[in-house]
Amino acid sequence: MARFPFSAIVGQDEMKQALLIAAVDPSIGGVMVFGDRGTGKSTAARALAGLLPPIMAADGCPYGASKEDQARYPDVCGQGKLVKRPVPFVDMPLGATEDRVIGSLDLERALRSGEKAFEPGLLAKAHRGFLYIDEINLLEDHLVDLLLDVAASGENVVEREGLSVRHPAKFVLIGSGNPEEGELRPQLLDRFGLSVEVRTPKDIETRIAIMKLVAENEADPEGFAARWAEADEAILKQVAKGKARLPKLVPGEDVLRDAAELCLAVGADGLRGELTLMRAARALAALEGAKKVTRKHLIAIAPSALRHRLRRDVLDETGSTTRITRAIAELFG
Amino acid sequence: MTPPEVADPLDDAVLAARLFLLAPGTFKGLTLRGSSPAREALVAALGEVLPLRRLPGHVDDERLLGGIDLAASLSAGRPIRQTGLIEEARGGALIAGMAERMDASIAGRLAQALDEGGTALVLLDDAAEPEEAPPASLTERLAFLCDLSASRRWQGVALEEAGGRLAAVRPLGEEDLRALAATAEALGVESLRALIVAAEAARGLAALEGRFETGKADLAGAVRLVLAPRATRLPPQDAEAPPPEEPPPPGGERDDPTDSDRQQQEPDLSEILVEAAKAAIPAGLLEQLAQGKAPRRSSSSGTGQKRKAATRGKPLGARPGMPRGGHKLALIDSLRAAVPWQAVRRRENGADADAPIIMRKEDLRIRRFEERAARVTIFAVDASGSAAAARLAEAKGAVELMLAQAYVTRSEVALVAFRGTSAELLLPPTRSLTRARRTLAELPGGGGTPLALGLNAAREVAEAVIAKGRSAALVILTDGRANIAADGSPGRPQAAKDAETAARAIAARQIDSLVVDISARPGPEGAALAAALGGRFLALPRADARMLKQAIDAVQAPPSQGARAA
């Protein structure tokens, strides 16, 4: 079935903005989407896959190696010619086994020819692309552990079943989940560059508009996709332009100072918050085609970049978002 | 002069890394706490000068220690060994991310390898809660522990080469050793290993600068890098020093005596060292120590019970057995078990060399998984009468505090409230703070005390939990004065009788229980209820949510930690 077009998703602007920013600058480190069921979390994440400019990757390489990968991992990435391929988007099921995620010994080849071959797993597939985990808060602990390890180091190291394999695994992690069904480990939460909260639209008109669109899509998926293709194409171009513009944007001293002051004011621990805030503001500026990064970009992205990094006092029920908007109002008027 | 730079934890970590590089065999490695850009930079710098082999958490014994190379053995028809990761990493270091999650069996192997020599280890500790820590068997053996979570720097990390060699530096003199030992004693560092390493670190600091003699600064540095992070108590004379939030002690002339001391005589060497240590004891630890608490425990305690599972959870080593009754065949392990016997079996069977692999029943291995059984704490809260509001508020606070750590302890919480003529399951077992907060936002209170109904409802929740293979514990907040019987009719005698029957039913199912009475004047009824439950009783007048949670934690600690319901 054709994917639901990204541009046809009604509302949920913060989530869409965060996903596009992650597409422009993967180094920001992924997006966590919190929210109820049926708010379009999975739809948006999956729709994103259709929106990304293709990458150049080694022909036939299971890791989709880039030129740099080929230099760094000559034994696993080979010397194949670079060809265009779509950005990988891997949907990791909750019940995935460890073998399936990290890869395993190719048993058939081992038995048939005594050859010790590695059968790449989902992490290999997701290299240079997106790894989407729905209900990530319900993911089993040992899988969370290995995801964290790989996300932190950018490579997957397999040392078992007699295998000793190291391959690149850099991906943008996209998680979604409902906090009512379980909290996320703070270490995992910290790995996400941005986090957004989505709610079901309460406005009747919006709800009706969504139902109409979904019905249209179900009646004629191809035609529906075709009708939205132009709008999706425009977003794809915007992302590609943003990517190209990104290296040219250098946030000025004033923006850096704003970022530091804001982090201090809301009590976001660690340097990672500041760095993410700065990168996200820059990516947003790039996405909007701005000439320079300004305070406006910073303020627009601050809730997403900081909301999950606040030191939490369990008995204080003030929401993170409220704390951030209050700090912004106090600092920047 | 340049303006005085604020000391960044990264500086000491770089120093520790240089010492480690100077003599990897002596110092064995470092533990780097706190995921931060600084740590990433330091690890990258280490990787420039030393081969680092990453040790994934899912490494198996065959790869760690070396074992049969399955593929090669299958094609050769005889066992072919391969080297393990520990051996391959000799001359460099193994680096383990998420060390706080490391399996005890892997830690055991590594500890052994560290003791044998030739192996060095870098542990990256991302613990977020006091309950989490890397295996103590490893942190104890690694010389240095650096906390980089608060570091504000990440640029320009370089590990300069040492000016001299460790062996060229003279051993420490009698007086220096004595001072180091006294400092260790003052900080409550009991391990001799730490003391020996501290002495070597002092020599190492001299060697880094190409000197042959150690000086006071080297000793102070060694104390800062090796002893301070291991402190388990504050130095005695400092124990009375006020924690920041307390008012200053009477007198207020604390500076004077030290000043006059200084004029009279040079301070004792061990005093200087203790001062050096004090400045370096991590802030969090200082707070913990000031409260008289033990420093972080290793990760094994306080978490849900581990149990072996057949189908899900973290994979454990395979074991011989038949793949039935829900057990899955561990194909690779089964093959590995069969390989060594192939030559013999072929001879026995008269098969030729091309014959497929000959498997026997005894080769079969089954997979095992480990699943942490969540512990569910069920609060049964007496919402009757005038004390209802206070009890409910504190219970809610305790629920929230417990859930805030739920991802560490894997515990879940449920809440039953009873008042009037009914008991109601307000919060079904959950791990979600968000959900608890929403459900418990407005708790109704007042009315009679149907204790029996409350106990029965709590027991039903507990039974459902146990039926799912998890463990349940009850925390009952009440003064124990029942006045509504199980059938909803008023009357103290019948109510008390029914409550006792309900309590005995819980005792019969051997469910751990704790009765907490937070009323201002606890009567005998609460204790009597606890006795009928076969549980414990705590009278906590004026308890708040935090005290309540601490009390529950203390009671629920595993038997090795002391308290356990009789």
Image (cartoon, rainbow, N blue to C red):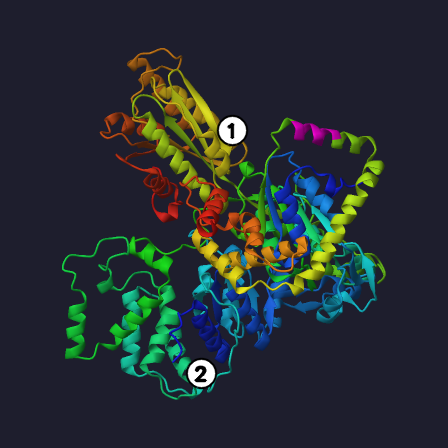
**Chain identifier of the residue bearing label 1 in the image:** B
Q: In the rendered view, does B362 fall on the left or right side of B260?
A: right
In front: B509, or B381?
B381
Q: Is residue B13 visible?
A: yes
Residue at the (48%, 47%) spot, across then down = A324
With respect to residue A53, does B511 lie above or below? Answer: above
Left/right placement of residue B353 relative to residue B364 reads right
Chain ID, mark 2: B
Label 2 is placed on what type of residue? Leu
Magenta stretch, residue numbers? A205-212
**Which kind of residue does numbered mark 1 sit on?**
Ala
Mark 1 or 2, nearer chain start: 2
Q: Which labelled disc corresponds to residue B208?
A: 2
Residue at x-position 26% and y-position 35%: B542
| Secondary-structure class at tag 2 | helix
* Residue at the image point whose x is 70% and y is 38% from the top: A9
Quarter placement of the C terminus of chain B: top left
Where is B97 relative to B414, above or below? below
Check chain identity for marks 1 and 2: say if they share one: yes
Q: Position of residue B209 (x, y in %)?
A: 43, 85
Relative to residue A252, is residue B178 drawn left or right?
left
- Name which quarter of the figure residue B140 lies in: bottom left
- Residue situated in front as seen by the camera: A313 or B495: A313
Mark 1 neighbour density, 10 Å: few (under 14) some (14–19) many (20 or more): few
> Where, quadrant-wise, is the N terminus of chain B in this rendering?
bottom left
Q: Main secondary structure of the magenta part?
A: helix
The location of residue B148, given as percent across then percent down, is: 46, 64
Q: Which mark is residue B464?
A: 1
